[in-house]
Image (cartoon, helix red, strand yellow):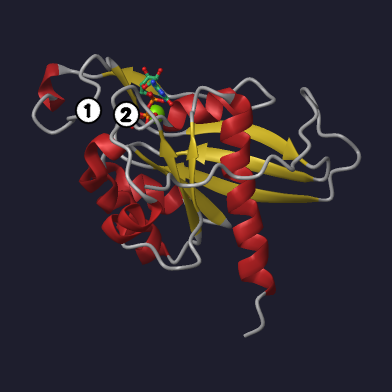
Amino acid sequence: MTDPPRAPASVSVPDSGKYLTSSVAGAAKILVVGPLGVGKTTLVGTVSEIKPLFTEAAMSQAGAGVDTAVDCAKTTTTVSLDFGRLTIDGDLVLYLFGTPGQQRFLPAWRDLAKGALGALALVDTRDLTASFDALGNLEDLDLPFAVAVNTFPGSPRYGVDDLRSALDLLPGTPLVTCDARDRASSIRALAALVRHLIDTATEPS
Ligand SMILES: Nc1nc2c(ncn2[C@@H]2O[C@H](COP(=O)(O)OP(=O)(O)OP(=O)(O)O)[C@@H](O)[C@H]2O)c(=O)[nH]1
Ligand SMILES: [Mg+2]
């Protein structure tokens, strides 16, 4: 069995702090999507070089029947968006927008997706079917994306081919693993997405 590859660590990420450095030559709006509790807010907070914006609210009893994350200990959820910023290779700034995990927030997704160049879709192998809505939304929005398997303790490990087939990924869609709590690993996942976006944009038609 072959695990999905870790994306190569070839990006340079200085801690640029509050202000953009003068070397920044371009910007891209990127969505971070995935089902409830997959680690979207964690990833945005892990990589952001500015103080991230979070919109967490307590999960109430009213949502107990529909807001079912694998991690039952989760007490808060994103109700609008997460926002963070990451400069990679000194010249490209990514503006990261984490989406809410619940499908009923799809209208908010549509607004967040305006002007986005692509998306990083987080997947939890403990419940692959929970990712179908998010991946379907990206296809509906015609937004190029990369998939990152966020590993949790006890996550089943599947081979690349099985995962690609279960998630019905196109051959060109990158599939990598990451730990949303780990900055280097999360940045590598975003770098895989950026490379995919560049490849897609420069493909001869
Ligand atoms: N073990 C492990 N735990 C993680 C990882 N990423 C996130 N967590 C934990 O999982 C929980 C859920 O993370 P969130 O970042 O809030 O998930 P989310 O996708 O933003 O959730 P919603 O906004 O509710 O959809 C938190 O308690 C995190 O600390 C990971 O890579 N490994
Ligand atoms: Mg969240």
Quadrant of res 75: top left
Most extreme residue toward the bottom, as rendered?
Answer: 205
Residue at the image point whose x is 25% and y is 22% from the top: 71
Q: Which residue is mark 2?
A: 37
Most extreme residue toward the front, as rendered?
Answer: 1
Q: Please state the horizontal and vertical placement of residue 117, each as a whole percent of the image.
A: 58, 57
Q: Nearer the viewer, residue 38 or 143?
A: 38
Q: Is mark 2 within 8 Å of ligand 1?
A: yes
Amino acid type, label 2:
Gly
Asked if residue 137 is positioned above or below residue 16 in the image, the reply reads below
Q: Please state the horizontal and vertical placement of residue 105, each as a whole percent of the image.
A: 29, 42
Quadrant of res 135: bottom left
Could you give the CA–CA distance between mark 1 and mark 2, rounded to whole angstroms? 7 Å
Would you say 21 lies left or right of 182 here? right
Asked if residue 116 is positioned above or below residue 85 in the image, the reply reads below
Which quarter shows the C terminus? bottom right
Q: Which residue is mark 1?
A: 70
Asked if residue 23 is positioned above or below residue 113 in the image, the reply reads above
Residue at the image point whose x is 51% and y is 29% from the top: 43
Is label 2 in a helix, a strand or a loop?
loop
Would you say 179 lies left or right of 185 here? left
Asked if residue 144 is positioned above or below residue 103 in the image, the reply reads below
Do callouts 1 and 2 mark residues in contact (Cβ within 8 Å)? Answer: yes
Residue 116 in sight here: no
Amino acid type, label 1:
Val
Q: Please state the horizontal and vertical placement of residue 58, each as a whole percent of the image.
A: 28, 16
**Which tag, 1 or 2, sits closer to the chain's start?**
2
